[in-house]
Image: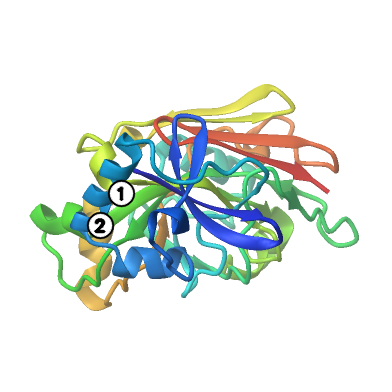
Amino acid sequence: MRFATVETNNRLELAVQVNEKLISLSSLGYTYHDMNELIEMITDEDIKQIELCLSLNKGEILEDYQWRAPIIYPRQDIICLGQNYKDHAEESVRYKKDAFSENREAIYFSKRVNQAVGHNEYIESNPLFVHDLDYECELAVIIRKDCRCTEKKDVKNHIFGYTIINDFTARTIQTSHKQWYFGKSLDTFTAMGPVIVTADEFQWPLSLNLTTHVNGEMRQNGNTKNMIYDIEHIICELSLGMTLKTCSIIATGTPAGVGMGMEPASFLSPNDIVVCSIEKIGELCNVIK
């Protein structure tokens, strides 16, 4: 099932995407406050009932709406993986060796998101102090229920679904600090969407193509099967010492092809159009403002 958050008639609405149509969840009798509450409260039986309603062509089709991030206000900072694809790790070290580690242990960091940006929304370029704005297409995992000391065989049961994140980054700010938090966390620097696709829609283990195009030019072209540390490893390792709470978001890293990896480096400018695509999820498009 494909869940979305949209804005229509000056209010936020949760919806289910069926083909190219969006069906209002409230018109089917499901009135969650937001996507966080949906993830926390929805049951397998609810999903079956929604599927039944959709098969009977019930529900209001939304006609006039704007996409918003599926989870506009994350409950906690996003957990991110750094250099989790070998080719991206190599290009990072080439760009600035003293700022990026060649260590192959998992690199975890967090990203503050006051408000996530949705499909077709703008990204602030901050030209007065950001001179090297970069993109990173990433598969994001959404946790369904609290997990602690999770075993590999149980990981799938703790995943609600997946979405796309574009982890926008100010490279100089990122690399001038020993921690990456500031350079990753400026307002509008997390784009998410267009939908969350529930985990049952995917074969396991995941093998999903992901690409990024800038102004129509392909920059990134990878596959999630090439992650150094896969989703099972990430969730098992993190949950050894911390509880991954319901609605937690984990961004699993990006493949090669980011702006800093090009020769010469090529960063984003106002009016650039960035499109991140992940197989079976869709396209996340943002314009630099």
Camera-nearest residue between 73 and 267: 73
User: Where's residue 241, x and y in %?
Assistant: 24, 77
Whether residue 4 is visible, yes or no, is yes
In the image, 9: left or right of 94? right
In the image, 17: left or right of 96? left
User: Where's residue 186, x and y in %?
Assistant: 70, 65
Q: Amino acid at mark 2?
A: Asp
Identify the secondary structure beneath mark 1: helix
Q: Amino acid at mark 1?
A: Ile
Distance Cα–Cα, label 1 vs label 2: 6 Å
Q: Which mark is residue 46?
A: 2
Camera-nearest residue between 250 and 283: 283
Q: Residue at x 12, y 57 (%)?
A: 154
Residue 242 higher or lower than 203, as above or below: below
Verify CB contact (< 8 Å) between mark 1 and mark 2: yes
Label 1 neighbour load within 10 Å: few <14, some 14-19, many 20+ = many
Quarter of the image for residue 108 reads bottom left
Q: Residue at x 68, y 44 (%)?
A: 64
Quarter of the image for residue 206 reads top left
Q: Residue at x 78, y 45 (%)?
A: 288
What residue is pinned by disc 1? 50
In the image, 67: left or right of 56? right
Label 2 neighbour load within 10 Å: few <14, some 14-19, many 20+ = few
Residue 116 higher or lower than 246, as above or below: above
Whether residue 248 is visible, yes or no, is no
Identify the secondary structure beneath mark 2: helix
User: Where's residue 275, x and y in %?
Assistant: 63, 34
User: Where's residue 212, x and y in %?
Assistant: 58, 32
